[in-house]
Image: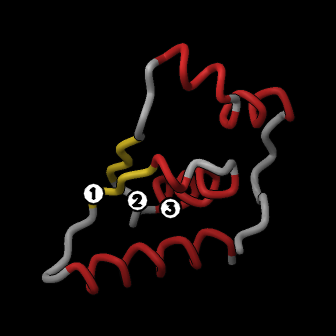
Amino acid sequence: MFAWQTPLSSAWQDSLVSPVRGEALGVDSLLLTGATGFIGGNLLVTLINAGLAGRLVCLVRGVSVADALARLRASAVRSVA
C-alpha cells in the first residue's frame, strides 16, 4: 500500500474521492497517460491513495501486458521512494 506523499490540502483530497463530485461530472473512469514518467507516476500514486484505483485506466507501452504492468509498478515504486 502506498502512503499519501503529496502536500495537497485536505479540501482538494476530499474533492478527489467525493462520490457526489464524480456523479455530478458523470465520470466513471479516468484515463491516465504518461503514468511511467515522473509526473504521471506521482499522479498515479496520488490517485490510487485517493481511492480511485477502481476508476483508473492507464495507457502504458509494453511488448506484453505483463511488461506494461511491470513498467507501471516500477514507476509507482520510484514515485514513493
Q: Amino acid at mark 2?
A: Ala
- Which marked residue is nearer to the observer: mark 2 or mark 1? 1
Q: Amino acid at mark 3?
A: Gly
In the image, residue 80 above or below residue 27: below
Tell which circle, 2 or 1, labels the residue nearer the N-terminal end.
2
Q: Is residue 37 left or right of residue 45?
A: left
Tell which circle, 2 or 3, labels the residue nearer the N-terminal end.
2
The reply to whether dot 2 and dot 1 touch (C-beta < 8 Å) is yes
Q: What residue would you read off at disc 2? A: 35
Q: Is residue 7 left or right of residue 60?
A: right
Query: What SS does tag 2 mark?
Result: loop
Q: What residue would you read off at disc 1? A: 59
Mark 3 surroundings within 10 Å by alpha-carbon count, few (fewer than 14), some (14 through 19), many (20 or more): many
Residue 35 image position (x, y, % from top left): 40, 59
Q: How many marks?
A: 3
The reply to whether dot 3 and dot 1 touch (C-beta < 8 Å) is no
Residue 58 image position (x, y, % from top left): 35, 56
Q: Residue at x 51, y 53 (%)?
A: 54
Query: What SS does tag 3 mark?
Result: helix
Q: Amino acid at mark 1?
A: Leu
Tell which circle, 3 or 1, labels the residue nearer the N-terminal end.
3
Query: What SS does tag 1 mark?
Result: strand
Mark 2 surroundings within 10 Å by alpha-carbon count, few (fewer than 14), some (14 through 19), many (20 or more): many
User: What separation in Å lies between label 2 and label 3 (alpha carbons)?
Assistant: 5 Å
Residue 16 image position (x, y, % from top left): 66, 34
Q: Residue at x 61, y 57 (%)?
A: 48
Q: What residue would you read off at disc 3? A: 41
The reply to whether dot 2 and dot 3 touch (C-beta < 8 Å) is yes
Q: Residue furthest top?
A: 24
- Image quarter where the N terminus lies is bottom right
Q: Is residue 58 left or right of residue 45?
A: left
